[in-house]
Amino acid sequence: MAEILDEKLDDIETQEKELELKESASTSLWRKIFSFSRRLNRLPYVLCSLILFFLSFSATLMWVVKYGDVTPDAAPDDNTILALGIIIIFLYVINLILTVRRLHDLKLSGHWCWLLIAVNFAGGYFEDNEMILKFFGIVSLLCLLILYFKRGTVGINNYGDDPLEN
């Protein structure tokens, strides 16, 4: 009888350990995705950027197909506008996190994201002046090319281990 109880207790302890392991794995995955504090090398950054672009393009395309010729009779309702706004903000935050982590891989502070954001918004502000608009477009493209193609810091830097070595 004591042996059966010991086996049952061992089974319960094993199940508890497995549950703790599953919970820590899901928490770890959540932290990996939504953490500003790690590094991200080129390939995952490019792939995630393409996925985010596809998702935002799809959301915009659905909007245009449904509400492309907006008349007072066919205006979008508030729930649709709210849902699209939430989706766009969510995608923007994920892109911001990924860009900060990519900057960390280049041994740059995540605060450089403010410059990237400023360049993109400044280009829209000067849309009437074609020369300034082209300048901001070229600067934005150069920043994007650096993020896509420049190799990250080899080995450990201030922001963590080299993701290529793990």
Image (cartoon, rainbow, N blue to C red):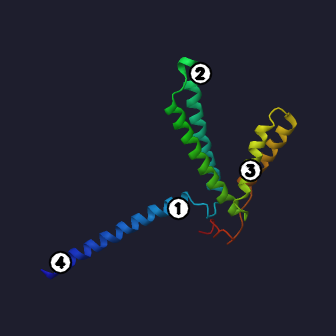
Q: What's the residue at 32%, 70% (across, down)?
A: 16
* Residue 94 x/y as whole percent: 59, 51
Question: Do callouts 2 and 3 mark residues in contact (Cβ within 8 Å)?
Answer: no
Q: In which quarter of the image is residue 6?
A: bottom left
The disc, 2 or 3, on the residue closer to the chain's N-terminal end is: 2
Q: In which quarter of the image is the N terminus?
A: bottom left
The disc, 4 or 3, on the residue closer to the chain's N-terminal end is: 4
Q: What residue type is labelled 2?
A: Val
The residue at which mark 3 appears reads as 116
Q: What residue type is labelled 4?
A: Leu
* Residue 147 x/y as whole percent: 72, 54
Q: Quadrant of residue 72?
A: top right
The residue at which mark 2 appears reads as 70
Measure the C-alpha gap from mark 4 to mark 3.
63 Å
The disc, 1 or 2, on the residue closer to the chain's N-terminal end is: 1
Determine which of the numbered discs, if any, sits on residue 5 in the image.
Answer: 4
Q: In this rendering, which labeled residue sits more in front, label 4 or label 3? A: 3
The disc, 2 or 4, on the residue closer to the chain's N-terminal end is: 4
Measure the C-alpha gap from mark 1 to mark 2.
41 Å
Measure the C-alpha gap from mark 1 to mark 3.
24 Å
Q: Please state the total of marks drawn on the protein image.
A: 4
Measure the C-alpha gap from mark 2 to mark 4.
71 Å
* Residue 104 x/y as whole percent: 68, 63
